[in-house]
Image: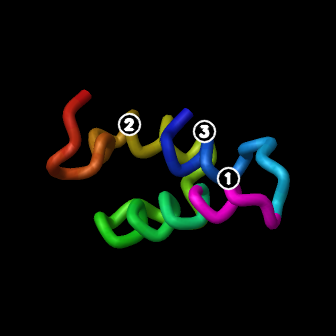
Amino acid sequence: MTVAQRTLTSSILHGSAEDAARLRVIEKLKARGDLFPPLSHAGILALDTAGKWPPPGVKR
């Protein structure tokens, strides 16, 4: 599971202060180039099999 996937599947109550923080995290992830909506598990595995995962600049 990626950080992007976890932020979207969080059980935080929408509209709460914690949700506002979650939304700020999503904006920061987008600003650094993370994909939103994030890739599915199958999509990541397909990219990994093709040698295209992880994205440039990301350590395994």
In front: mark 3 or mark 2?
Answer: 3
Q: Quadrant of the N terminus?
A: top right
Q: Earlier in the sequence, mark 3 or mark 1?
A: 1
Relative height, residue 17 to residue 49 (above, below): below
Residue 8 appears left or right of 49: right
Q: Mark 1 or mark 2: which is in front?
A: 1
Q: Which residues are magenta?
A: 15-21
Task: Reply above or below: 19 against 49.
Answer: below
Between marks 3 and 2, how big is the CA–CA gap?
A: 11 Å
How far across and how far down the image is residue 29, in percent? 41, 60
Q: Marks 3 and 2: CB-CB under 8 Å? A: no
The spot of residue 19 in percent (x, y) is 70, 58
Q: What amino acid is at disc 1?
A: Glu
Question: Residue at image x 57%, y 58%?
Answer: 21
Q: Position of residue 52 (x, y in %)?
A: 29, 47
Q: Residue placed farthest to the top in the image?
A: 60
Element at badge 3? Answer: helix
> Which residue is under mark 1?
18
Instruction: State the predominant SS element of the stretch in magenta.
Output: helix
Which residue is painted at 25% across and 28% down in the image? 60
Give the residue type at disc 2: Asp
Name the residue tied to disc 2.
48
Q: Is residue 58 magenta?
A: no
Q: Alpha-carbon neighbours of circle 2 within 10 Å: few (<14), some, or many (≥20)?
A: few
Give the mark nearer the N terminus: 3 vs 2: 3
Amino acid type of the residue tagged 3 in the rendering: His
